Image (cartoon, rainbow, N blue to C red):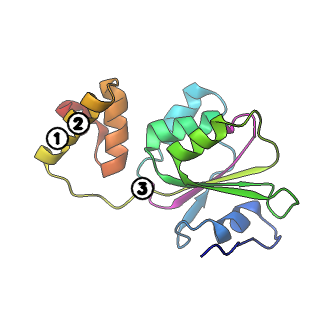
Amino acid sequence: AGIRIRPVPGASAATAALSVCGLPTDAFIFLGFPPRKPQRLDPYLASLQREPRTLIWYESPRRLKALLGALQAILGDRPAVIGREMTKRYEEFLRGPLSQLVADLQTREDIKGEITLLVAGCAPSSKISRDDLRAIIRRQLAENPQPPSALARELAAQFNLPRSRVYDLI
């Protein structure tokens, strides 16, 4: 409806962002700052693939683009919200799938301010037949060739399936 929704200053940036994010608020998990190094970040994010609650992090503006890319690669293209400089003069909220947020931030030279990142939890298990999954795999490989492990990780997150099962089908 074009109505601007703004949080009221409070004790926590996480709850302020949650109050205006548009993601499920009935259950959430605050995770602080994610690991900085990729060798620790990737397994950490993989451990959250099946987490159903809304995920909330604080992140440095310098590391935000890398985190968004890792989230998209490991968790899939989930809905997300970036809250920047909340309750301050240059307050900004970016909403959309992780892929859109990555694309939006690529056009910016630098990002400034305090960042709160919210990502939708894993959707309830999507029932998909083996044949339908095979068809999706064929289409994905034809449209966007990628390593089997990357495709398995993406589809496993999307359909809440074990990655090894998807990898075997690929």
Residue at screen point 77% across, 35% down = 110
Where is mark 1, residue-wise? Answer: 135
User: How far is disc 3 from disc 2 in space, using C-alphas?
Assistant: 23 Å
Q: Residues within 10 Å of mark 1 (few under 14, many from 20)?
A: few
Q: Residues within 10 Å of mark 2 (few under 14, many from 20)?
A: few
Q: Is residue 49 visible?
A: yes
Give the secondary structure at mark 2.
helix
Query: Residue 161 in the image: x percent, y percent?
Result: 28, 47
Q: Quadrant of residue 94?
A: bottom right
Q: Is residue 89 above or below residue 148?
A: below
Q: Mark 2–mark 1 contact, CB under 8 Å? A: yes
- Residue at the location (37% across, 46% down)? 157
Q: Tag 1: residue type?
A: Ala
* Mark nearer the N terminus (3 vs 1): 3
The amino acid marked with disc number 2 is Arg
Q: Amino acid at mark 3?
A: Cys
Left or right? Give the position of 48 relative to 111: left
Circle nearer the viewer, 3 or 1 = 1
Residue 41 vertical position relative to residue 96 in the rendered view, above or below: above
Between marks 3 and 2 in the image, the one whose residue lies nearer the viewer: 2
State the extent of the magenta-drawn residues as a range: 51-64
Q: Residues within 10 Å of mark 3 (few under 14, many from 20)?
A: many
User: What is the quadrant of the N terminus in the image?
Assistant: bottom right
Name the disc covering residue 122, or none: 3
Q: Quadrant of the C terminus?
A: top left
Point 45% across, 46% down: residue: 77
Q: Which mark is residue 139?
A: 2
As for residue 11 lying within the magenta part, the answer is no
Asked which secondary structure carries label 1, the reply is: helix
In this picture, residue 115 sits left or right of residue 130:
right
In front here: 84 or 144?
144
